[in-house]
Amino acid sequence: MAIAKKQIKRAVDRNKIKRSARESFRLRQLTIGSFDIVVLARREAAAASKKNLSRSLNDHWLKLAQRCG
C-alpha cells in the first residue's frame, strides 16, 4: 500500500490512513474474497476522523464484495 506525498503531505496522516485500511481489511477479508486490491487516498482523507475512515472503507468493501461475489 502506498499513499502519495503529493496527495497527503504529512507522514502521520498517511500512516493513519494505512493503519485504518489494514485494520478494516483484516476484519472484512473473509467476506471480500481473494483478489488484489488497490486503495487510493484523496486529500480529504487526511482531515477525516478515524470513525469516518472506517465507515467509508466498510462501505467500499461491501460494494466490492457485491460486485465480485
Image (cartoon, rainbow, N blue to C red):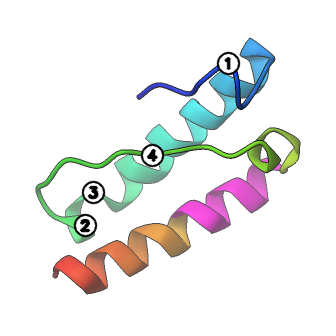
Residue appearing at x 45%, y 46% in the figure: 39
Verify CB contact (< 8 Å) between mark 3 and mark 4.
no
Residue appearing at x 33%, y 73% in the figure: 64
Q: Residue flagged by tag 1: what amino acid is it?
A: Lys
Quarter holding the C terminus? bottom left
Q: Is residue 18 left or right of residue 28?
A: right
3 vs 4, front mark:
4
Q: Is residue 62 left or right of residue 58?
A: left
Q: Which mark is residue 29?
A: 3
Furthest-bottom residue in this view: 66
Q: Residue flagged by tag 3: what amino acid is it?
A: Gln
| In front of the other: 24 or 61 | 61
Find residue 20 and report its horizontal and vertical position in percent. Answer: 59, 42
Q: Earlier in the sequence, mark 2 or mark 4?
A: 2
Residue segment shown in magenta: 49-57
Q: Is residue 18 left or right of residue 27?
A: right
Task: Report helix, strand or loop for mark 1.
Answer: loop
Find residue 68 and report its horizontal and vertical position in percent. Answer: 18, 77
Q: Which residue is mark 4?
A: 39
Q: Which residue is mark 2?
A: 32
Task: Report helix, strand or loop for mark 4.
Answer: loop
Find residue 53 and report its horizontal and vertical position in percent. Answer: 69, 55
Q: Which residue is mark 1?
A: 5
Verify CB contact (< 8 Å) between mark 1 and mark 3.
no
Furthest-right residue in this view: 47
1 vs 3, front mark:
1
